[in-house]
Image (cartoon, grey):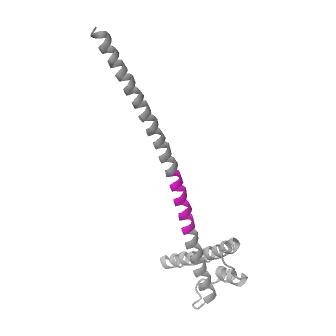
Amino acid sequence: MHIEEQERQLQTKKKMKNTYASKIAKLIHDEGRIEPSSAMLEQGASNSSSGGNTNMDNLRKGQHQAIKEDKLLKNRLSAQKSRKIKKQYMEILEERVRNLEAELLEAKRINERNAELIKKYCHN
């Protein structure tokens, strides 16, 4: 019974792999990345382990390349967004520093003026 269960699981995995491959092929086709023929899409849904199927091998290579390019593009966009957010954050922090330095300078002036007043009125 254990062997039968393993075989069933293996068959299920193969079916899922075929479905996954055909969905990716359709998605890539819809996005205009590559132009698989309808026969290639059907082979992706029906064949999982045909030894010398060069059309499917080429399709998989194309899929792999398209997925890799998508990942690189997403990574670039994410990095751009991250840099933009970091730049905005740094600008906010720099503005806060300028404001705090101005407040500190004003507080020092007030402190010096108060010290002069204290000397003037307390020592006379």
Q: Main secondary structure of the magenta part?
A: helix
Q: Locate residue 7 relative to residue 123 in the image: left or right.
A: right
Q: Is residue 21 above or below residue 106?
A: below
Name the residue nearer the viewer: 22 or 72: 72
In-front residue for pair 112/69: 112
- Residue 101 falls in which quadrant of the image? top left
- Which image quadrant is residue 22 in? bottom right
Residue 118 versus residue 47 in the image, above or below: above
The residue at the point 51 percent across, 55 percent down is 83
* 84 drawn magenta: yes
Name the residue rendered at 36%, 23% in the picture.
111
Q: Is residue 55 left or right of residue 9?
A: right
Residue 116: say if magenta. Answer: no
Which percent across, then down, holds residue 68? 55, 73
Q: Given the current orientation, which residue lies at the most extreme top position?
A: 124
Q: Position of residue 93 (x, y in %)?
A: 46, 43
Above or below, 26 relative to 74: below
Point out residue 118 in the picture as x, y percentages from the top left corner. 32, 14
| Image: magenta residue range | 71-85
Nearer-the-camera pick, 69 or 1 = 69
Q: In which image quadrant can residue 108 be found?
A: top left
